[in-house]
Amino acid sequence: MAIRHNADDQEFTTTRHGYEAELAYARPADGVIDFTHTFVDEGLRGQGVADELARAALDFARKEQLKVKTSCTFMAGFVKRHHAEYADLLA
């Protein structure tokens, strides 16, 4: 599945079979990215789409050497479930 990063809108998105999903973020100037909201259309739920968005977004944070905040409850849970992979990114 193709994940697109739209820096102007501060979001990661994907479209599949006409359904959309997005992971929004805010990027304060202090080197921290805050993942604020995840949305997945009904037609894509239960297929791991949100997990793929999360991985792409966290890979971006790592590449850009950003620390991560998770205001979004989905992202907070994802990072908690995958703590060994992403603990070093947490602000």
Image: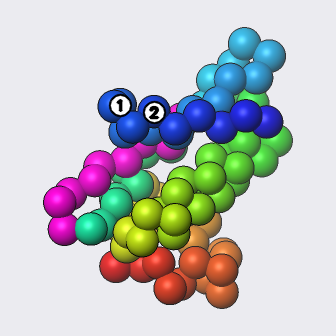
Question: Circle 2: is it few (<14), some (14-19), or many (20+) Cα within 10 Å?
Answer: few
Residue 71 appears in the picture as rendered: no
Q: Mark on residue 6?
A: 2
Label ID, residue 9: 1
Q: In the image, which disc is placed on residue 58? A: none
* Dot 2 amino acid type: Asn
Contact between marks 1 and 2 (CB within 8 A): the answer is: yes
For the rendered model, the colour scheme is rainbow
- Identify which residue, 68 or 8, lies in the foreground: 8
Q: Is residue 16 above or below residue 85?
A: above
| Towards the viewer: 59 or 21 | 59
Please identify the quarter of the rendering in which residue 80 is found: bottom right
Figure check: 70 above or below 42: below
Image location (x, y in percent) of residue 3: 65, 37
Image point (59%, 34%), residue name: 4
Mark pair 1, 2: CA separation: 6 Å
Magenta stretch: residue 18 in it? no
- Image quadrant holding the C terminus, namely bottom left
Residue lying at 30% horizontally and 67% vertically, measured from the top left: 32
**Residue 64 relative to residue 43: left or right:** left
Give coordinates of residue 74: x percent, y percent: 54, 56
Nearer to the camera, 21 or 3 = 3
In the rendered image, residue 35, in percent from the top left (x then y), is placed at 40, 55
Q: Few, some or many C-alpha atoms within 10 Å of disc 1 (few <14, some 14-19, many ≥20)?
A: few
Q: Secondary structure at mark 1?
A: loop
The count of marks equals 2
At 59% from the left and 62% from the top, the residue drawn is 59
Q: Quadrant of the N terminus?
A: top right
- Type of the residue with mark 1: Asp
Residue positioned 50% across, 85% down in the render: 88
* Image vertical order of residue 20 relative to residue 29, above or below: above
Q: Which residues are magenta?
A: 22-30
